[in-house]
Amino acid sequence: MTLKEKKALAAEVIGVLEAVYPEAVCSLTYSQPHELMIAGRLSAQCTDARVNLVTKELFEKYRTIEDFAGADVEDIERIIKTCGLYKTKALSIVTMCRQIMEEHGGEIPRTLEELTKLSGIGRKTANLIMGDVYREPAVVTDTHCIRICSRIGLTKGKEPAKVEEQLWKILPKEKSSDFCHRLVLFGREYCKARGPRCSECPLLGICRQII
């Protein structure tokens, strides 16, 4: 498929998903920008549903970036233990918040480059912040995005950075962030990793691969 054809396919997919999921909402629960950053860090190798359960207690106890910067790492470990890799995640949460306080005056960085310099923040979470917090174009290559875009025929491969690079070339920038949110909703309802509901799928006539 040519780049032009992939752009046309992407536009068609976006149109269908916009109709099926008018509200493109983030699946992580947060009320402040730093909470999204921390929830994004916790979501590595963990379901969003589990993260949302854990962050309820976490965000009630620690309310600001400064609170997290001064937190006892062991207490963070206790709260987030069920998220997996909890020791590494707890340390990076405290460290990233200290970096923000010491290097950015308590403000979350506004560029992808600066965000990815924070402890534990990769391109996926950095893009999530750029899109949801700063309303900038963003491509969040989570497992849903990688799986679905490959099945549809928009991308090839499973490496997040390479999938992101491919999507930047074909997605309208103003729709990129919402498209990724809709992929999560679509992936949970129809295009599941196991047992996808192909016969009921709203993209049935578009998808390049019938499972």
Image (cartoon, rainbow, N blue to C red):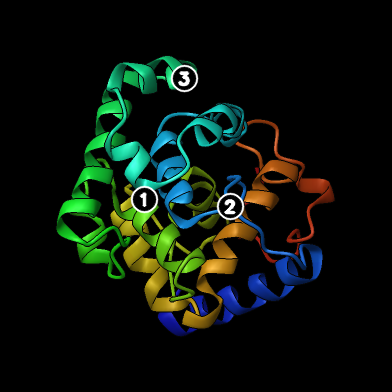
Horizontal side of 203 relative to 50 (left or right) equals right
Which secondary structure lies at badge 3?
helix
**Crowding near the residue tagged with mark 1, few <14, some 14–19, many ≥20 C-alpha atoms within 10 Å:** few
2 and 1 marks in contact (CB < 8 Å): no
Which badge, 3 or 2, is on the more N-terminal residue? Answer: 2
Which badge, 2 or 1, is on the more N-terminal residue? Answer: 2
* Mark seen at residue 79: 3
Answer above or below: position of 108 versus 160: below
**Residue plotted at (42% across, 46% down):** 64
Nearer to us in this view, 96 or 114:
96
The outermost residue toward the bottom is 4
Cα separation, mark 1 vs mark 3, equals 35 Å
**Crowding near the residue tagged with mark 2, few <14, some 14–19, many ≥20 C-alpha atoms within 10 Å:** few
Which of discs 2 and 1 lies nearer the camera? The answer is 2
Residue 87 sits in which quadrant? top left
The outermost residue toward the right is 200
Counting from the top left corner in percent of width and height, residue 71 is at 31, 29
Residue 20 sits in which quadrant? bottom right
Which secondary structure lies at badge 2?
loop
Residue located beneath label 2 in the image: 31
- Kindly identify the amino acid type of the residue bearing the numbered disc 1: Gly
**Residue plotted at (28% across, 65% down):** 112
Which badge, 1 or 3, is on the more N-terminal residue? Answer: 3
Counting from the top left corner in percent of width and height, residue 47 is at 55, 31
- Kindly identify the amino acid type of the residue bearing the numbered disc 3: Ile
3 and 2 marks in contact (CB < 8 Å): no
Answer above or below: position of 205 versus 148: below
Which secondary structure lies at badge 1?
loop
Residue located beneath label 1 in the image: 157
- Kindly identify the amino acid type of the residue bearing the numbered disc 2: Ser
